[in-house]
Image: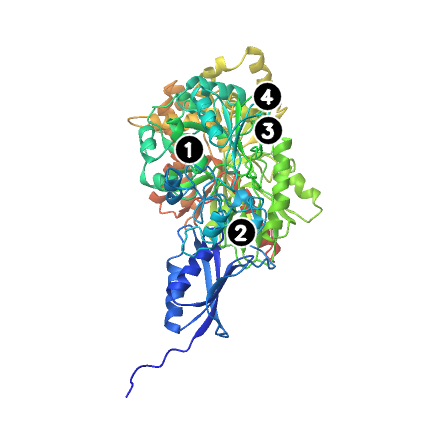
Amino acid sequence: MNDAAPPAIAQRLRIEVRGQVQGVGFRPFVYRLAGRHAMEGWVRNDRNSVTIEVEGPPPQLEAFVRELRERPPPRAHIEGLRSWPVAADGRHGFAIHDSAAGDGADLSVPLDLALCEACRAELFDPASRRHRYPFIACPDCGPRWSALAALPYDRANTALAGFAPCPHCTAEYEDPDDRRFHAQNNACAGCGPQLELWDGNGAVLARREDALREAVQALRGGAVVAVKGLGGFHLMVDARNADAIAALRTRKQRPHKPLAVMLDGVTEIKRHCELPQPARAALCSPAAPIVLLRSRGTLPELIAPGNPWLGVMLPYTPLHQLLLRDRGLPLVATSGNRSGEPLCRDGDEALTRLRGIADLFLVHDRPILQPVDDSVVQLAGGRMQVLRCARGLAPLVLPGLESHTVTGMALGGHQKATLALGGPAGAVVSPHVGDLDSVEAVAAYRHLAETLPAMLGLPARPLACDGHPDYRTSAFAHESGSRVLAVQHHHAHVAAVMAEHALDGEVLGVTWDGTGLGDDDTLWGGEFLLATRTDCRRVASLREFLLPGGEAAMREPRRAALGLLHAAPDREAGALLEHSFTTRERTTLQQMLARGVQCVRTSSAGRLFDAVAALLGLHAVTTFEGQAAMALQFAAERHQGAVPVLAFPLDRGVTPWRIDWSPVLGLIRQRGQDTTAVAAAFHRALAAAIAEVAAAFAPRPVVLAGGCFQNRLLLELSLAALRARGCEAHLPLRLPPNDGALALGQLAVAQACLEGSPCA
């Protein structure tokens, strides 16, 4: 008698996997997983997912799905997985099918990935056939978004389409046991991209290994070398050569703004910076962003003048690895552009736009199809916070904005411009474009506005823009001929954080930044808004003052300081500005203030920071955005000992409530140039004022947004003060606090308003 159980009847499942599942070796992973579980079927990339059909006994199917969900490839991130039964067909074997273009939106956007450890080992292994090949890549690393022409992610849709694989690479691609099985970016020195070194006129000086060697020699000699990397050019110099750094600053007309540094490994970083564990994890992540770290003062101060923090990144491409290893010293690696312009992305463009800045050009023939800058993050409030969402982090997919019937595009702001696209499957925020102050920057923005929707299968129809009519993005919206919702600047800031954290209902938004057009046509920037997705109401604000000369005050903190003194006269504090103006300048500006001519009224926290910095002698005139406010933050962080008592009264007898900053003038008068003490007291008083207003509107969640919350000290003091009052606080983490998040906020407001809710 045979008691053996009959074999289980085979069943077949169709599985749809959404998320970060293209460009991460997901199909080869599924192929091997099916082999381990003896599954029949197939896998393919679709336009907005990976689709799998597997057939086998139910216990093995369950084990397959469980491992698929719980142990995906290291670079993959599953946002959603659903399965349903289909008819079994009894076919044998498992196959990787060609991708299906399909219809509809595609939110499976592959991101650029830093060089993995396996490829790094091959790069420096003399026995490897890819030894010292600057474009080594595999399913776990290499260019994705920057090399993408269309979706789905297949070689024919990438920058490698013009490079036919050699027999060796073809054999790897077809071998299920090879780690480059079905790797779309597979190439080697025999069939892939190559290096060239050009002089300033574009003449080829060297190729391949010789180009790399001569570039390294030039860097050793103090030259400025423009290096074509993954998403654009870097301008690179020896980070220990103060003369080379000074030359770069002079040529690029960037006298003070911090420069990023590329260091070869964690050990090297620890020599130059403090490295807390969360920051180390961010540096070593597949995104490999620039991370702000506290400097140990071992590199020339000229890299970040007056700044205790260094922007540090690891070499995230094989080319960068070779440059650093051969150079043996750290390199400054700043964006390859002129101030106000977007990144250069090909050699001819770099020759034109970087002429007079770079001495030499280290280029390659792999096209950069989507230019993308380096991402920037910092550790604040115990968590990593994005300050620039770009390479490795963007396009950022936010599936939390699901089930929307309204589709289209939000156009962001004028500074730190981004785009946001929305549809039924979620929202996508573009990589950082930058400030739209040049013809080249506007052209890059317009190009992205045309290509990104087409690539993702989402409508290019503008839905929303900023309420400021003079922004280039607003002009672009109105040129489209579409009905476009103008979203108030600070409402968009709040809505972006609400969207990121999936907050519904009413929140108290604390939106502090440099400027944003208010509902009363003044410049807001120190606001407290009771807000939902569709509406907002200003309930409190910083006390207003005048900015003589309007926009000029954004570059000259001394003007903001005069405006502060005009609103709250203090002769002794005003005496501190005596050397900031000529007699004629001061007389003219004071007359403008007295008559209200060519002056703009503002409640801006950013301009308040500028004014206090100018009164303390930190900066009368700035050369980059945020310079004065940063100096004030760093002064406060240097303070040791007791902090002077300073409180900003909250006037609840007016609408909106008003926070009076004028006591800081008395403290400045009393303390003179005791800069660090005043700066520390100023930060604490602002944080206390935030908590006082928030407590009055409890238990509503509090949202902190706007560029002022890039200030780590202000953010952490505010979070502590809010916790002490029992307030629930939310801050932007995956998107920046600054205007880089405006597009997402505009999209969230527009979708909520246009889907039937009344919009104020």
| Mark 1 crowd level (few <14, some 14–19, many ≥20, 10 Å Cα) | many
Residue underneath mark 2: 153
> What amino acid is at disc 3?
Val
Instruction: Compare marks 4 and 1 and give the one earlier in the sequence.
Output: 1
Residue 59 located left or right of residue 556: left
Residue 586 drawn above or below residue 628: above
Residue underneath mark 4: 594
| Mark 4 crowd level (few <14, some 14–19, many ≥20, 10 Å Cα) | few
- Whole-Å distance between the Cαs marked 3 and 1? 52 Å
Instruction: Compare marks 4 and 3 and give the one earlier in the sequence.
Output: 4
Residue 419 located left or right of residue 503: right
| Mark 2 crowd level (few <14, some 14–19, many ≥20, 10 Å Cα) | many
Instruction: Compare marks 3 and 1 and give the one earlier in the sequence.
Output: 1
Residue 414 % position (x, y): 59, 36
Tag 3's secondary structure? strand
> What amino acid is at disc 2?
Tyr
Q: Nearer the viewer, mark 4 or mark 3?
A: 3
- Whole-Å distance between the Cαs marked 4 and 2? 62 Å
Residue 225 located left or right of residue 686: right
- Whole-Å distance between the Cαs marked 2 and 1? 28 Å
Tag 2's secondary structure? loop
From the viewer's side, name the closer residue of 68 and 387: 68
Residue underneath mark 1: 322
